[in-house]
Image (cartoon, grey):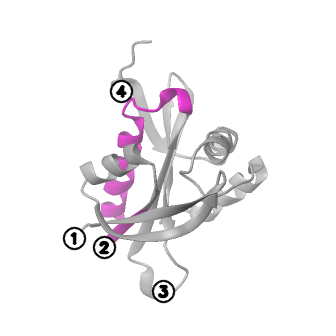
Amino acid sequence: MTFDTAQIRIRYAVPGDAEAITEIYNEAILTTTSTFDTEPQSVEERKSWLLSHGPTHPIFVAEYRREIVGWGSLSKWSERPAYNGTAETSFYVREEYRGRGIGRLLKQATIDEARKLGFHTLLARVAEGSEASLHLNESLGFTRVGTMKEVGHKFGRHLDVHLLQIMLD
């Protein structure tokens, strides 16, 4: 299939996107180490998560031919007020669309929005074995600041998590 990223539309997520977001996230839960959730989420759980984000921590979706094929988000790093200038970035792409530049578009949209919102720094957590995600983050300016050894357990093994950071100002 010929694919043109110029046909991808990135927009803010709305509550009506919860079903597609849930499908993409559940696929990642069941088949990847990109999330350490281990049980599929319900649409209602994802809708509640979506509504909890708001304008200071937006969620984006990537549409291709009117189908949501990925999503990305800025999430609070911590509830403690001193961390308000820091956010965590995440992105997920439907399996059949991975490796086509959609993750890059979503990640760049979150970085651009974080700058507009006045964030000082962004973080990303990338599980061991996710070389494509590490490469994508680093190619957009994130640097590795540490590795948390064997902090997750999924698919029968302990996994390290790399912490990456980009300073925005």
C-alpha span from label 3 to label 1: 19 Å
Q: Magenta: predominant secondary structure element?
A: helix
Q: Secondary structure at mark 3?
A: helix
Mark positioned earlier in the residue sequence (3 or 4): 4
Q: Which residue is mark 3?
A: 81
Q: Whole-Å distance between the Cαs marked 4 and 1?
A: 29 Å
CA distance separating discs 3 and 2 = 14 Å
Magenta region, residue range:
95-124
In the figure, 137 relative to 101: above or below?
below
Residue for badge 2? 120
Residue plotted at (36% across, 40% down): 105
Residue 31 falls within the magenta-colored stretch: no
**Label whose residue precedes the other's in the sequence (4 or 1):** 4
Q: Earlier in the sequence, mark 1 or mark 2?
A: 2
Which residue bears the numbered disc 1? 169
Residue at disc 1, secondary structure: loop
Q: Given the image, on which type of amino acid does mark 1 rest?
A: Asp
Earlier-in-chain disc, 3 versus 1:
3
Q: Quadrant of residue 163?
A: bottom left
Q: Which mark is on residue 5?
A: 4
Q: Where does residue 130 sit, x and y in percent of width and height?
A: 44, 48
Residue 118 in view, yes or no: no
Q: What's the amino acid at mark 2?
A: His
Q: Residues within 10 Å of mark 2 (few under 14, many from 20)?
A: some
Q: Residues within 10 Å of mark 4 (few under 14, many from 20)?
A: few
